[in-house]
Image (cartoon, coloured by chain):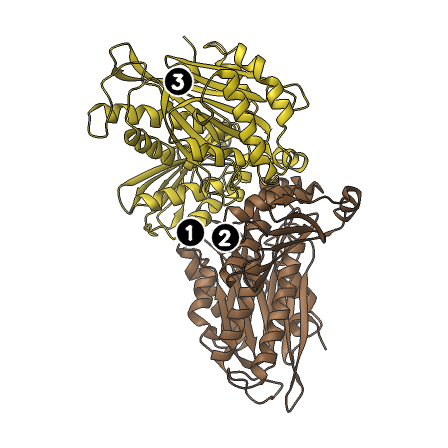
Chain colours: A brown, B yellow
Amino acid sequence: MGKGITYPMGFYANGISCGIKNNGKEDLSLIYSIAPCIASGTFTTNQFKSYSILWSIKNIKNKIRAILINSGNANTCNGKENYKLTEKLIEELAEKMNLEKNSILFASTGIIGERLPYEKIRSGFEQLIKNLSIENNLLAAKGIMTTDTFPKEYEINTGIQGRKKEVVIGGIVKGAGMINPCMATMLCFITTDAVIDKKALDIALKNAVEDSFNMITVDNDMSTNDTVICLANGLSKNKTIHIDTPEFELFSNSLRKLCIELAKKIAYDGEGASKFIEVRVNGGWCKKDVRRVAKKVAGSLLVKTAIAGENPNWGRILAAIGSTNARFDKKNIEVKICGISLFKGTEPQKYDEEELKLLLKNKEIKIEIDLKKGNFSATAWGCDLTENYVKINKEY
Amino acid sequence: MGKGITYPMGFYANGISCGIKNNGKEDLSLIYSIAPCIASGTFTTNQFKSYSILWSIKNIKNKIRAILINSGNANTCNGKENYKLTEKLIEELAEKMNLEKNSILFASTGIIGERLPYEKIRSGFEQLIKNLSIENNLLAAKGIMTTDTFPKEYEINTGIQGRKKEVVIGGIVKGAGMINPCMATMLCFITTDAVIDKKALDIALKNAVEDSFNMITVDNDMSTNDTVICLANGLSKNKTIHIDTPEFELFSNSLRKLCIELAKKIAYDGEGASKFIEVRVNGGWCKKDVRRVAKKVAGSLLVKTAIAGENPNWGRILAAIGSTNARFDKKNIEVKICGISLFKGTEPQKYDEEELKLLLKNKEIKIEIDLKKGNFSATAWGCDLTENYVKINKEY
């Protein structure tokens, strides 16, 4: 059995180098299902959308058999001619795979404004298709990477028993830069062998994305190419999951867990990051308030640089909280870093500076905020801001 | 005649080192008017406000004679006791200057969460008052600096003739870090010898701040201490300026020009910045749209790092524009960097790469965007993001 994207039954994958990246690394991936899939997707809300996304938005209502993904070229704002190239490319792939062209989705990531490397991509098709297998999940995860430093996969069991086997879910994701809290997300592909109706899959995915990819931030910049696609091929032969069947909660929770783990991998691998930051907000008056505060703190450049400097500058955390319009009890609010209370009520707290200094050397830093205004909670994930982020983006 | 803050008649200033900063640099400033002033102010909208700001908000309705400013300590979130210390400090200064305590405003900038250095500040009063003069405007500008690399002053003639002299305006400002587009601004003090009614001064200042300090961004972080205060002592003996007198426009335009010049100095001196960026947006459907796009582009970390790398990555500019909900004509939009058109309609443009490469070496970079949707325009100012920004904020 495969891992990641090929963990569910009937999914095959592959990743190759077709020459878009000039360092010889994988830059073209293919995900294939032996059975037609119900597909659900969330896409960037950026007004400029990749031509690849426009193709996928048009076709996601169909029964899907494959997803083609290239990295190194965003296929965005590169001129209208590239939409025609996109269509032509998918037509050729469909012919080679003996599929309908409207059963293939397409996603791209990389530099904006350059011509789609049509010839390079089509020249890779033969090798890409030939070596599709359940073992090549890792190659597919590598083929979608840009400035990521490691491939990102996850797989999960749902506890839902089908006639054939237990329903499982797998996924791959890429992240690193142009990661923003107000949008769909970066590229993420999820597979499941569940039998599930379209509406239930749409709702489960939307909710999972809300609590995972929409709660991470690397640099507050919204991409033109963000995509999450989930394919369900039904091969586990479970009783169909509808939103009112008891299995819906099991499936939704598993999908949420998978999305959160993949999202955390993105934050962990933020461009130039040396530390992973988790911001937990409790005691909120409503869901919107806690989400807003968590993302604001995780996204603050001053908080991010303080963490990079292993500097417990809680004043910057309070400034970020106060800059939102979230409700909190100004006389009771509490802020902790690494479990140590630093500000409570209206007063700075005494604490063991040496102990906190040591804790701040860890790779994973937890910030906890209690708004003392209600019962809602949210968690956001991010990373520190280092000189390397600047270096990477000056050059990229 | 003085410059900056002492350019208008009857204003005296001074700046000294009282020991808050441990490098011996100026950290305490005083601005004094020989006549009572009408005062207008805009303050941070952060929910956590400095105790110094709370004092000033309470007293700005009074006739004002002086403003005390310290740098190196924000007097924010440092415990309730510090509001009492604030009051005590102002009382002592009032006694020494023979003024009413409620005629003195107070502003602070620096680290959040540390006790107000009451003893250090009061020990400086004698020297501070003794050397108040129209020549010490530059010392006052230095006394409000934090990570600024140069003091920031500006002065302007209004063209309005008073019985005594022409009405003029002067100002000082500090910037560098925690500069954000959605708030009042950083510390800025403006003086004028105009005779003007309170309502007219409030409106002129509000409009000027909108087009100047609210259009700059360094790091998208909102401070707890932002303050703009304008004092008008009436010594030029002009005919009183009301909102319906012809001089109101002259005064407003001069005040706007002064605020824009001071705001640009902040962007110019952004923490770690190597380049100044001006983003001009034309062709907008409404004022909100052009302002939003200008600030979004100026604030994008990816645009800022591209400029730092002298990299004409216009795709990041389009991605930032598209991430807003501003209306634009997707078939006609145009983006220029340094006067060279890089994207127009739906197509990337051919351009002389060597020429642009040379232009990007300049210290001042202009980005022009035409939304092709209407007649509104706006300009935002910012700076590039360099490794030095990160270094400064890891350590500060």
Is the N terminus of chain A in the top left, top right, bottom left or bottom right quadrant?
bottom right
Give the number of marks: 3
Q: What numbered label is drawn on residue A222? A: 2
Q: Nearer the viewer, residue A364 or B127?
A: B127
Q: Position of residue A325 (x, y in %)?
A: 47, 51
Which amino acid lies under the numbered mark 1 shown in the image of this protein? Gly
The answer for which chain carries disc 1 is B
Q: Secondary structure at mark 2?
A: loop
The answer for which chain carries disc 3 is B
User: Which quarter of the picture shows residue A245?
Assistant: bottom right
Q: Position of residue B390 (x, y in %)?
A: 63, 37
Q: Do the dots labelled 2 and 3 sit on one chain?
A: no
Question: Disc 2 and disc 3: Cα gap in Å?
Answer: 40 Å
Q: Secondary structure at mark 1?
A: helix
Q: Residue at x 26, y 41 (%)?
A: B375
Q: What numbered label is drawn on residue B322? A: 1
Is the C terminus of chain A in the top left, top right, bottom left or bottom right quadrant?
top right
| Mark 1 or mark 3: whose residue is earlier in sequence | 3
Seen in the picture, residue B156 relative to A296 is either above or below; the reply is: above
Q: Nearer the viewer, residue B382 or A355?
A: A355
Question: Which numbered disc, 2 or 3, marks the residue closer to the eye?
Answer: 3
Q: Residue at x 54, y 58 (%)?
A: A373
